Structure formats: C-alpha cells, structure tokens
Amino acid sequence: MRRSGRFLFWFVVALFVVSISTLGYVAIEGVHWFDALYMTIITITTVGYGEVFPLSTGGKVWTMLVIVMGWGVIAIAVTEIFSVVLSEELWRRRRFLPKFRKMKDHYIIAGYGRIARYVAQFLKSNKRKVVIIVPDRENADKARQDGMNVIEGSPTEDKTLRNAGIEKAKALITLLENDADNIFTVMSARTLNPDLYIVSPATDRRSRELLYKAGANRIIQAYELMGQMIANAILKPYVLDLFSVSNFLIEEVLVNEDSPINGKTIKEIYAEYGGDIHILGIKKQGEAVQFIPPLSTKIEAGMILLVAGKPEVLEKLKM
C-alpha cells in the first residue's frame, strides 16, 4: 500500500471507530451527540475524567467494548499515521539518491560550514553541478534552504559517497570540522575513485602529510594562507587587489582541437581579444607550468592555460 493510501486508510478507520462509539452512546443513553462524542474520546484515550452522564447497564457494557476495541484500533491508527509521516520525510530526503548516482563531472563538497557554503555557492554561480554531503541535520537544512543538492550522512562512509556519485564525480572538496574526518573521507573517496581530484584543508604539517598519504591532490593550509593574505593587505595591498578584481576571473582552460585559440600565438590571441584576457601561464603534459610565456608561444591542443579574463571571454575559450 502506498504511503498516502496507508495514511488515508488508518485515518478512516480511526474516524469510523469514533463515529460508531458516539452513535452507540446516543442510541443507548439517548444523550446529545456532543456529550456522546466527549464520552467516546475520554474513554478511548483513558484519561480518567469520569462519566459525562449516568450510565445504564447497556451503557456500561458499551463503554467496555469501546475501551477494548477502540483503544487498540486508535493506538494502531495513530502509530501508523506517525509512521507514514516520518517515512514521507525519509522518502523526501532519499528520492534524489538515484539522480545523484547518475550525475557525471559534478563537484562533491563534504560539510557545509561557512567556508563550504561559500565554495558551494561560488561553484553553483559558475554553473557547476554540486552535491553536498552533510553529517548533521542543522547544516543539511541550511544547504537545502540554499537550493543545494543534499545527502544527509557521514562522508567517511563508502555508502554515502556512492550515493553522491563519487565514481563519476569530477572533484571532492572536504571541508569537515576536524582533520581526522577529512583524512578518512579522502581515504574512502580515493579508494572508490582513483582518478578523482581531491582538495582538502589542513591545520598543521602532520595533517597535511596524512592527507597527502590518504590520496589528496591539493592541500590548503587555511590559517597559513589567511595569515599571508592579511599580511599582504598591509605590506602589499595592490598585489592583493589583483585577486579581487570584480570583472575578472582566473581559471584553467584546457585547449581542445575545436578551441578558437588552437594553433594561434599568444600575440595573435591578444590582438583578437584585446585586454579582455591575459595568459599567465602554460602547462604542457609532463612539464611544469611556464609562467608569463613569450608572445611568440603557439597554443596547441592539450595545453592547459592559466588565464585571467572576463567571464564571457573565458566561456568562449572553453568551447
């Protein structure tokens, strides 16, 4: 029986029992229907308020029947109704699991604290598919209110990661409250997807070493990075402004065969796009990043470019 059908069935059963009991008192004792209904309710619920009206022998027999049959039926009905309500909530939270498992090239974020929330919103604003794994209900509800895809569960468990589609995800970002949970999450994710790109913060050097051993690709030492940025805000304020220009983004662009810049030199690209983009570096397969490459450098398919530019221009380069 479907959930809505179960709910309706037991509601009708409870209503039927109350109605029959009420009509019995009206027929046997000849009382007003409201007094009969009140008597039925206090009898079934066994609250012990006493008789509403004097009972005859037939009324007392009927009262015993109401207690024996009515209390049991109502108890079952109430239990079933609450069970349906709770199962509806669980179903609502689980109904998207098949959808998540079928997702591809999406970003999984473990945790939904302040930093995780910002990362998720930034990725979503850049039209990236995001799935949030949250171990606690409070933050899970916050993520749902923000319109995120949410799985409530522990990201350290393989089952939860599989429900999030870890096998086909593009990247995992672990932003849990402590390093131990981040380490276990990275370890589990790396086992399930050897090709996954994993980013995680670390609070100290020991945690950083363990995260690398667990399989993380990039470790962010948040406190150290924040300290450097605060110091640069005082010592080198204009350098910091470079990363906060509102109309420019810094992104990695993989050059493919159909790319509009494939086969062109950097000088030709600048002539075409003007000051809307700046190529900061080039990464060739198997080589280190070459920063500030010469204008005569020819762009070829397979290269990864570190580009600063306007969002609309960067979108054209990704085509």
Image (cartoon, rainbow, N blue to C red):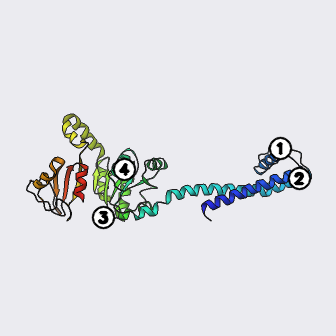
User: First in sequence: mark 4 or mark 1?
Assistant: 1
In the rendered structure, are the residues bearing label 3 and label 2 in contact, judged by CB atoms less than 8 Å apart? no
Q: In the orientation shown, which residue stands out farthest toward the top?
A: 234
Q: Position of residue 238 (x, y in %)?
A: 19, 37
Mark 2 sits on what residue? 28
223 relative to 290 in the view: left or right:
right
Instruction: Say which label, 2 or 4, has the lower sequence index.
Output: 2
Label 1's element?
loop
On the question of residue 291 being in view, the answer is no
Q: Secondary structure at mark 3?
A: loop
For the residues bearing labels 4 and 1, Cβ distance under 8 angstroms? no
**To which residue does mark 4 refer?**
120
Q: Of the residues under marks 1 and 2, which one precedes in the sequence?
A: 2
**Nearer-the-camera pick, 29 or 114:** 29
Residue 195 - label: 3
Q: Nearer the viewer, residue 251 or 114?
A: 251
Q: Which residue is mark 1?
A: 50
What residue lies at 20% left-to-right and 36% top-to-bottom?
A: 237
Other-residue count near label 2 (Cα within 10 Å), few / some / many at <14 / 14–19 / ≥20: some
How far apart, in angstroms, are the residues tagged by discs 3 and 1? 73 Å
Marks 3 and 2, Cα distance to the nearest angstrom? 78 Å
Quarter containing the C terminus: bottom left
